[in-house]
Amino acid sequence: MVRNLILAERSPLTGKTFCVEKELEKFFLSPSVKAIWLDSFWWIFHERYKPDKEIQNKLFDRIALNYASLLFFGPGTFYERAILKRLPMLLSKALYTSFCCCFSQSWLSTHEFKSSICDTMGLWFSGIYPSPQSYSNWNYAKLDPERHRREELMSLSKYMMKGHRGGISSERPVSSGTKSEDSYRTQDTYTPKEPRRQTLVSRKATQQVKNISEARWQAESVSKQSHPACKNPKMEKYLFNVCAKSPLILHFLLRYTSMAQHGEDVLITRWEPGRMLPETSLTYRDIIRLVLSNMMRRRNRVTQLHQMHQQGWQNFDRHLRELWKNFQRELKTIDQKEAEMRKKAHRFIMSQSSAKPAIRPTRESYLKEIDFILRRYHSRNPR
């Protein structure tokens, strides 16, 4: 757990802590700091999960004794004084990684849990609340490596499956959000640029590497903060004690010394947010994602409707072609039937004409015909 804390203190840009790592490890492995760490862990455990005021009072008393001894006899070097200035935040990170290691199957990455740890340590050791959501910049990949590794594998597998289904290919650079210890070590070593460039040119990224790069880029974008898409809470006036006093030191002075409390409280008025925004409030990133997903869903719907429209016209054209073919087929059948009827009628007429005898005109019919023609002529020409 001390190693997790030291790795989490490394800067993501330089890979170095604010002091020498050996001094930081030595400080947290000292008996008084180990006792403060352990008693604070059990105090928060009883406060949240198994309240017991008697045990909590004893734990708080021991924490006050150890902290007082640490201040009176401990800070001698420059590194120790630098660590003491950051002790509330360092202990908050130490308690968080302790809970994560002890309860690896529990979901502890909630704002309520982390803010309670930070507020408790800030009030105990400095007498003031820390800045809101000061835990948002923690390196959770080092404080909770097991859960972070499990979540990263789940996100990678999810985006890889999405990439295989949708054929996603990306050319973004590989970035995992938080740099590991090995990456910091490799940055300090010198490597020639020309062979490196030739290697990158000759080596082609496979589809699996592209999918992993896409997933890591998505994970990095998720880790970035986004402001809630709503109005800021109203600012209200609060009294702030400039000469803040540590409850641990006050408890030690009241209980174990007869020393009178000196000094005075200097109160000033400052503006603070009246209420914190709820965790479930949508951020601008969430709204952008919802808009993009709605656009994608509507685009897919329009594409489906267009395909259905094209399919309907194709079916309609196919049906019209079938109807035209049937009409041509029936028309051809009717023409064939009519041709056959004509042939049959012609054969019937020919057969009847060949069967009847030829009628020869007689003298009487001939004279009647001449008489009819003459009357017709005289009727038209009376003169």
Image (cartoon, rainbow, N blue to C red):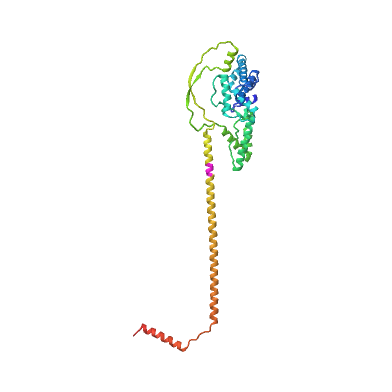
Image position, residue 250 (x, y; %): 57, 15
Work out whether 13 lies above or below 261. Answer: below
Q: Main secondary structure of the magenta part?
A: helix
Q: Residue at x 57, y 25 (%)?
A: 116
Q: Does the rendering let one see residue 42?
A: yes
Q: Residue at x 54, y 42 (%)?
A: 297
Q: Does the rendering let one see residue 210?
A: no
Image position, residue 62 (x, y; %): 62, 17
Which quadrant of the view contains residue 161? top right
Q: Is residue 167 magenta?
A: no
Work out whether 137 lies above or below 31. Answer: below
State the residue in front, 52 or 288.
52
Image position, residue 379 (x, y; %): 36, 83
Q: Residue furthest bottom?
A: 363
Residue interval drawn in magenta: 295-299
Picture quarter with the N terminus? top right
Which quadrant of the view contains residue 131? top right
State the residue in front, 119 or 371.
119
Work out whether 104 lies above or below 126. Answer: below
Work out whether 215 lies above or below 66. Answer: below
Q: Residue at x 54, y 54 (%)?
A: 315
